[in-house]
Image (tube, rainbow, N blue to C red):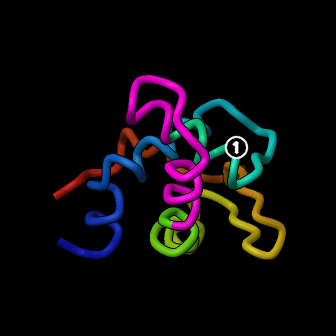
Amino acid sequence: MDERDRLLASQRCRLVLEHFAGRADPVDLTALASAIATREQNHDTGHECVEHVAISRHHVHLSMLSQFGLLEYDAGNARVASCPSRADTRTLPIS
């Protein structure tokens, strides 16, 4: 399994990509983390949980998603946006 396949196999990564399906506007990293944490927990989450998700996304997945052309990540401004030319991840094979 290569890096892209491992990345796309992550449930959090796929939740991030789902969040941007059909969305053109950029999202603040904290707002994205809050949305992901809420989906994972099925209820609103506290600040510590959101912060953990934000840090995890920043250090683990967002730069790699950007590298593969699936998202645009501006780490300096903590903004994430869908890449206009991104492939539909539902069609990407996961080994």
Q: Is residue 18 above or below residue 48?
A: above
Q: Viewer-proximal residue, 13 or 91?
A: 13
Q: Position of residue 7 (x, y in %)?
A: 35, 63
**Segment colored magenta:** 37-55
The structure residue drawn at horizontal position 39% and vertical position 36%, both measured from the top left corner, is 40
Would residue 46 be found to the left or right of residue 93 on screen?
Answer: right
Farthest top residue? Answer: 43
- Horizontal and vertical percent position of residue 78: 76, 64
Residue 18 falls inside the magenta stretch: no
Residue at position x 69%, y 55% in the image: 29
In the rendered image, the vertical position of residue 65 relative to residue 10, given as above or below = below
For the C terminus, the quadrant is bottom left
Determine which quarter of the picture holds residue 9: bottom left
The number of callouts visible is 1
**Pick the front one: 80 or 69:** 80
Residue in view at x 70 percent, y 34 percent:
23
